[in-house]
Image (tube, rainbow, N blue to C red):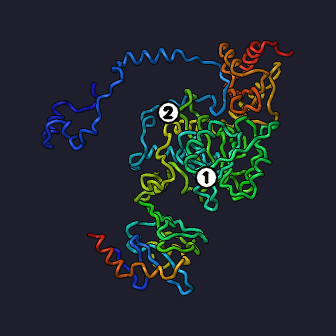
Amino acid sequence: MSNNVPAELRYTTSHEWVRKNADGTVTIGITDHAQHALGDLVFAETPESGRAVAAGEACAVVESVKAASDVYAPIAGTIVAGNDTLADAPEKINTDPYGEGWLWTLKPAAAKDVDALLDAGGYQKFLAESAE
Amino acid sequence: MAFIPHTDDDVRQMLATIGVERIEDLFDEIPPALRAAPLTGIPPAASEMEIGRLMSERAARDGRPLSFIGAGAYEHHIPAAVWAIVTRGEIYSAYTPYQAEASQGTLQTIYEYQTMLASLTGMEVSNASLYDGASGLAEACLMAVRANRRSKSLRILMPRAVNPTYRKCVQAIAGNQNLRFEEIGFDPASGQTAFDAVERHAGSDVTAIVIQQPNFFGTLEDVDRLTDWGHKQGALVIAVVNPTSLALLKPPGEWGERGVDIVVGEGQPLGVPLAAGGPYFGFMTTRMEHVRQMPGRIVGRTLDLDGRPGFTLTLQAREQHIRRGKATSNICTNQGLLMSAATIYLAIVGPEGLERVASASMARTAELVAALTKIKGVREAFTTPRFHEALLKLDRPVGPVLDELARHGIAGGYDASADFPELGPTLLVCATETKTSGDIATYAAALGTVLGTARAA
């Protein structure tokens, strides 16, 4: 079971991770658990720059050989950019979900919203409970 | 007779094995309130012999008039080999090929069909077919809305010169999904979509523009100008085309600077009989950048675990059995039988044959128009270049004229008066390669008689 959960990131119960960047933006992707559950990724549709999104709004779609899943905005904000490199290499989401497999960057509506998300321990607890 | 291979003994043995007394007991989970009651109001069943006789009597009432009706469905010669092959059991009753390892024949046929249609329309990828041209246009409009992420207006420019039945169908299917269709008028002198009516929308948020070529009147539109205009506005361009005409006309993939975005049309002219209006099939092709928004089945070619080539359904994550409410469409099938007939038709006639059919149809229609317009009271509505249909203006209501022609054994054409009242009494006529000069002379003589005037010398 893929359980890599980096300590410095924040998480949601819909399996997104959030990294705070130095310039005040955040980077968002799906967790190791999610990529493992989806299987081989074949396509990712990322949001367009400038779009305003609410917390919980579907922003992106990741498609594997067996499923197509929505990815939700963990917090409200404005989309800065989607990861264009995924068009030719969607498998990065499988091989490096927290690094090169990032999905989009966001300018948060409120910086403190990130702190209200699950921390690594909270997400791990959530995964353990869901597995029962 | 029950068409089930099990004898009563077989059934008793199976029930005993699973510990059930009667078959009815297997349904005991269904609450009594939900069980189906017997159907009252349905007459008693008729025997096979009685039904056969009833159907023969009804069929005998069908006439076989000399038909000059087009208006979306066209009578073409279908080589005998097409239906000799398509009525084989393996093709005639094939089901959707979910299980690739058991359906390679069906999948290969669909793949070849897709290849032919993509090639014919000048586009990059095709689906496995849709129900018909009209619903295909509705799907294209919905697809354009999904694919054009920059546009938020959901406004689609729909020329009046697009088939009126298609426009009604599109409104019925897509109108309830917040799409708005802006009507674009045509030039009453040329029969072409009026460019100044299109230009009025410049600068506004247009999601897509629809161009039918040839249009409902059979008239050729200025497709390059309309396509480039649409793209300049940030709109997607949807082409509605006649597949036979593509043997002669520039394919939509080459319209304007960069070609259109989505192509749809009615596939019936390719080896499908008129059959009182259906079943027909719709085709849809597009570019790879939009393939994930395309509805319907798609077959792909791939390699199996041992590296051998094979075919399979692909890109299924668009479809409703995976995506549910977010699927590209509710359609989860194709018109397998008719699509197979079209594939065999195209394989038999080939590009040269299709060109000959198209040329002959154009020539016969020109001959027909020349013959009919010699009659006092009949004139061409438009003199602009056309494919194999023409709109004629009559000097009196068209309905009674068609009724009289029917008594002469002639289906004279489509009465377009109700669809375009501003043009007065109009008749849309079509002659394909199936009509001879003799047939045309027969029609002209009959029309001359009906209109009560002799043909001008």
Q: Position of residue B110 (x, y in %)?
A: 51, 45
**Three-letter residue code for mark 1:** Thr
User: Tag 2 or tag 1, which sits nearer the N-term?
Assistant: 2
Residue A101 visible (yes or no)? no
Q: Residues within 10 Å of mark 2 (few under 14, many from 20)?
A: some
Labels 1 and 2 positioned on one and the same chain: yes
Identify which residue is drawn at 50% across, 40% down: B335
Q: Chain of mark 1?
A: B
Name of the residue lying farthest toward the bottom: A22
Nearer to me, B97 or B151: B151
Q: Is label 1 or label 2 in front?
A: 1
Identify which residue is drawn at 50% across, 18% down: B59
- How far apart are the two marked residues, 1 and 2, measured between alpha carbons? 29 Å
**Three-letter residue code for mark 2:** Ile
Q: Which quadrant of the structure image shows residue B29?
A: top left
Q: Position of residue B92 (x, y in %)?
A: 45, 34
Q: Give the structural element (helix, strand or loop) at label 1.
A: strand
Task: Name the residue beneath numbered marker 2.
Answer: B85
When the figure is inspected, residue B323 is found, relative to residue A61, above or below; the finding is above
Quadrant where the image shows the N terminus of chain B: top left
Q: Position of residue B329 (x, y in %)?
A: 50, 50
Nearer to me, B143 or B203: B203
Task: Name the residue beneath numbered marker 1.
Answer: B286
When the figure is inspected, residue A73 is found, relative to residue B62, above or below; the finding is below
Identify which residue is drawn at 42% across, 60% down: A67
Residue B112 visible (yes or no)? yes
Quadrant where the image shows the C terminus of chain B: top right
Q: Chain of mark 2?
A: B
Whether residue A131 sits left or right of residue B227 in the image: it is left
When the figure is inspected, residue A132 is found, relative to residue B188, above or below; the finding is below
When the figure is inspected, residue B142 is found, relative to residue A78, above or below; the finding is above
